[in-house]
Every structure is written in C-alpha cells, then in structure tokens.
Amino acid sequence: MSALPATTEAPSTLPALLAQLDDTLADARLSDDERRVLVHTLREAQPPEDGLRQLRNRAFDLVRTRTADPEQLALLKWLEGVVRAIDTGRSADGSVTVRSQAFFSPGTACLQAINHQLRSARHSVDLCVFTLSDDRITAEVLAAHRRGVSLRCISDNDKEFDAGSDIGQLRAAGIPVAVDRTEAHMHHKFAIFDGARLLNGSYNWTRSACEFNEENLVLTNDPQLVRRFADEFDSLWKELQAPR
C-alpha cells in the first residue's frame, strides 16, 4: 500500500488519527515512511493520555479482528497485558498527565462516574466492593462482560446473600468472583479499569448510597496509586482464591 500522506498538516482530531492508524494496516505492515508520518502527526496533534490510550486500544482491536488462531490470540492478550503494565508502571514525572476528580452523594454523580468507567472499559475491570446491589451498576458490569472485557470481582460473604445483592448474578454470568469468608469484613470499595484508572472512596455500590448517604468517590489515573491498588487487588485475589 502507499505510505501515509506525507503532509505537514497533522490531523487535529482523534477520529482523524484513528482513521490514519486504520490505513496503515491495509498491507499488514508498518513501513518506515508510515511510522515516521504517524510519529509526526502524533507530535503535532499532541493528544491527551486518554487519546493515546484509545489509539493503543484501536491498534489491538484491528489486530484482534484479523486473528483467528487461538495461540495468536493468547499471544495478543499477553502483549496487551505487557503494554498495560508498562503504561501503569510509568512514574508520574510528566510522562503521564495525572488527572483526578471527586464525586459525592446523595445524588447520581457517583453512580454516573462508576457507570461511565464501566462503559469505557476495553480490556479489564477489577471490582473490589463490600456490596453490590444497585441494578443500574450491575447492568453495566454484565454489559462489559458481554463485550469481552475481562472482569474479576471481590466481595464480602456477609453481604453476598443480602436481599438485593447482585453478586450471584455476576457469578451466574461467568464472571470470576472471590468472597472473603473470614469473620472480618472485606470492606474495600474500589475498582480498576484497563489497568489505568482507579475509582476509590466510601461509596457503597447500592441505591441507598446514591439516594440517601453522604458518600464520596475519587477517580484518578495516577500510575503510582493505580499500581498500589492493583497490587492490593492481586494480593487479595490470590488469598481469597486459595483453598480453605
């Protein structure tokens, strides 16, 4: 195929960059000219971190749609995991623009923040929540699962069988669930999306938290915080999955 147009005018919007990325795959190779022009347009457009993440996701999606062999798909998933680990492990020294937001209830701000992140997830979601009984959130979790997003959920046994608890729905849908069955509580309320974004706060994932309680959530892409919470999740997951 022909190289990307050698123009000094860079695409100014993310859709243009995505389209340019699509064009480079026509012959299943990235030529030196295509790479140079892609680097040039990225430097000119200077997309934010979320835009760069979308470009990375699109590249993986393009390859995934052309890959049918199970071994190749497994290798692609491995590569995705490595790229996410590298992105997450970068220090917040200017290589990543750290963005954080705070949300409060009562009101729908926390609910909307959770559901927006669930809808935006492309690869993975790790949920670590004391309880889950808000059907509006559960619907988005199940929708992400149907899209092929890799999900894991950790919860607490004392809340698993509460009236209205949706943990059983997740398990029945095939989502891996680990439950703390000790006398103490697994009282965390945090979630990690695509290994890059963290939601954490007092907010229980219930209707009462949305409609009545004074609660909070913080959303951040700070790599150090994301990594710390991801390590805690993995530690809990390993512990709670172990035979008792």
Image (spheres, rainbow, N blue to C red):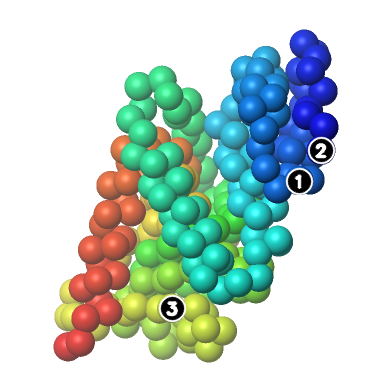
Mark 2–mark 1 contact, CB under 8 Å?
Answer: yes
- Closer to the chain start, of discs 1 and 3, is 1
Which residue is tagged 3?
A: 176
Residue 4 visible here: yes
Which residue is tagged 1?
A: 27
Q: Position of residue 206 (x, y in %)?
A: 51, 67
- Which image quarter holds the C terminus? bottom left
Q: Nearer the viewer, residue 47 or 193?
A: 47
Position of residue 14 relative to residue 117, above or below, is above
- Which image quarter holds the N terminus? top right
Q: Is residue 179 left or right of residue 176?
A: left
- Closer to the chain start, of discs 2 and 1, is 2
Q: Position of residue 24 (x, y in %)?
A: 74, 38
For the residues marked 2 and 3, what is the alpha-carbon distance in whole angstroms? 44 Å
For the residues marked 1 and 3, what is the alpha-carbon distance in whole angstroms? 39 Å
Please give the name of the residue rendered at 49% of the width and 78% of the height, measured from the top-left corner: 175
Q: Secondary structure at mark 3?
A: loop
Q: Nearer the viewer, mark 2 or mark 3?
A: 2
Please give the name of the residue rendered at 51% of the width and 71% of the height, measured from the top-left corner: 71
Residue 164 visible here: no
Please give the name of the residue rendered at 20% of the width and 87% of the height, measured from the top-left corner: 243
Q: Nearer the viewer, residue 142 or 11?
A: 11
Badge 1: how crowded within 10 Å, few (<14), some, or many (20+)? few
Which residue is tagged 2?
A: 1
Q: Is residue 2 left or right of residue 35?
A: right
Please, what is the three-letter code of the amino acid marked with disc 3? Pro
Q: Secondary structure at mark 1?
A: loop
For the residues marked 2 and 1, what is the alpha-carbon distance in whole angstroms? 6 Å
